[in-house]
Image (cartoon, rainbow, N blue to C red):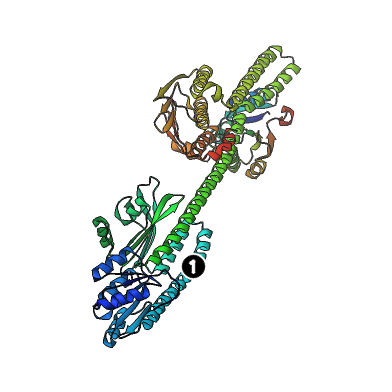
Amino acid sequence: MLRGAMTGEKILVADTNDDSLRQKIETVIGERYKVASVPTEKGAIELIRRERFDLLIAETNDGLGLVEAVRRSDPAIAIVLIGNHYGIDNALERLKSGPQALLLKPFSLSELGRAIEGALERRRLLRDNKRLKALIPLFEISKTLMGEVELERLFDVILEIVWKETEADCVSLMLLDEAGQELVVKAALGPSGRVKNGKERVGEGLAGWVAKTAEPLMLTEETHIEPHLRRAMTEMGAFSVLCLPLVVKGRVIGVLRSSKTKGAPFSSSDLEFLSILCGQAAIAIENARLFSRVKTQQIRVEQLLKQATLAQEDERQRVSLEIHDGAAQWMVAASYRIQAFHRILAKYKVAQAETELHEIRNIIDQSIKELRRVIANLQPPALGELGLLEALHQNLEKFGKDTGIAYSSQIEGIPLHIPPILGIAVYRVTQEALTNVRKHAQATKVDVILRFQEDELCVVIRDNGKGFGPSHVLGNARSVGQVGLKGMKDRAETLGGTIAIESAEGMGTTITLTLPISAPLPRELSPMAKILNS
Amino acid sequence: MSIRVLLVDDHPVVRHGLRRMLEQEEDIKVVGEAVSGEEALAQIESISPSIILMDIKMPGMGGIEAIHQIKERYPEINIIVLTLYGDQYLAQAIESGATGYLVKDIGGEDLI
């Protein structure tokens, strides 16, 4: 009789030729362990698939097939083999490693007890050892995973760990795309090295099934699974597959799939190990993604700041050139004329002096007009009060009045509410284009078209003036107009849009600004608006 | 014998002002006006100025390049730079062969 407390370990007694022996074993060990017995080999295999046993007792003469099958589905199960000399040697040959004990017939009940306890003890040790071995890398893994913020490197680290720890032949890490429809292979390790392509739809294939159900899938050749999953497995050329979801806060973000084409099938301990790993990997991936998103945003912010600074410099140069070419020249002329006037007066040429004075008056008036125009152009548009359409209209009306150039304005599509920053860009580009027309184009007509499309906003400024060849835009000489064109381009690019300038000598000029309406500007950028407006 | 002056400046109002001011002097005669370096070079042969008043920034050939070319062909002509740009172009202008460099806000007395 075996004495001692119930250990709770489960023992399966498989079919023996000797019914009385089976019953005896069952009776003797039943006090200490939980025992199940099945009379047939098939029954034993089925039971082991459904339930987990710690030990199998079988006979060598006809139970070896069963023992092998059991070992395949659970390499860690302890086995006590009962047989004669010949049978035992044969069995040793076939079973190779694993916790096991041999019992030669005839044996006493205490010998049976020792064999069982010995095999179970070996199993416990092996399991503890394995767990310990698994725990140490888990700590390391945890440290490595959490420390890695570069996604690509993180993927590689995860793959290497799985590959090494589970002895899988192929490991793929797939992540769900943004729509949650497709699993995209982000990294994979296979017999032929690293591969990195391939997709699998959610709901289809093994990984697709796991992504859909959020349940892990452990498959061996014997597992009963749906035919399409079996097919998927065959297509992979694998005889054992372990597929686990990567879950963060209850949401599947991807799937880790590992497969074997040879060696021992995946065991339940592989499943346990990978479950823990996948939990950590999923969090690490999510962290790395957040990190990369923050980094991308930061780079974009830096870029925008740089662009804004450049745009500001260009704008300053534009203003400087405009004052230089406009008001300043008038003032210089006025100064010269006053000096001329002074000399005429000194010589008493009164009639000439009157003409001169009149001219000076005209020049100063012209300067004042020019300065007023520059001042008005520098004022931020009152888009908030007027709205873009009205502000544009007023600007165009004033342009027509000042220059005598005929104008038309047209709105296409349904005017939508657009973010102020886009409105300012449209307004400024139109204003700049009109300034160019006024100064350089010698046009008689200007058309402004504002086009609202589903995801785009276009403004077209078209004149019938003298136009310019490409050399004028690309040449080194800088005129107000050219600085203006560059300013328009910077403005458009800052907002993710484009500027198209079509012109040819004698053919007029058409400037088209296209801006995406849902500009991909992170919300944190709102202070940018201030910089861009200034 | 009066001083023959060629005015080179792309702003008509400035050229006109200069002309009116200079014409008050009996010994100065404005013999020509040009809006760019090219135009100035084309005129020199026929009008043979003794002094050229030259702006720096002009569309087409600018002042610096114009001074360079004029001095190469007509070293005897004195060129005085007239600009709004402070001393920014002074070194370049002198290097090119300019005789004088005046900022446009100077009084006519200095110029004359």
Judged left or right of residue A272, residue A39 is left
> Looking at the picture, which amino acid does disc 1 mark?
Leu
Q: Quadrant of residue A445?
A: top left
Judged left or right of residue A323, residue A474 is left
Residue A159 can be seen, yes or no: no
Compared to A3, does A457 lie above or below?
above
Nearer to me, A190 or A400: A190
Nearer to me, A37 or A341: A37
Judged left or right of residue A459, residue A531 is right
Residue where numbered disc 1 is placed: A135
Compared to A380, does A4 lie above or below?
below
Q: Residue at x 39, y 31 (%)?
A: A454
Q: How far across and how far down the image is residue A12, in percent?
A: 33, 71
Nearer to me, A52 or A89: A52
Q: How far across and how far down the image is residue A204, in percent?
A: 29, 52
Badge 1 local density, few (<14 within 10 Å), some, or many (20+)?
few
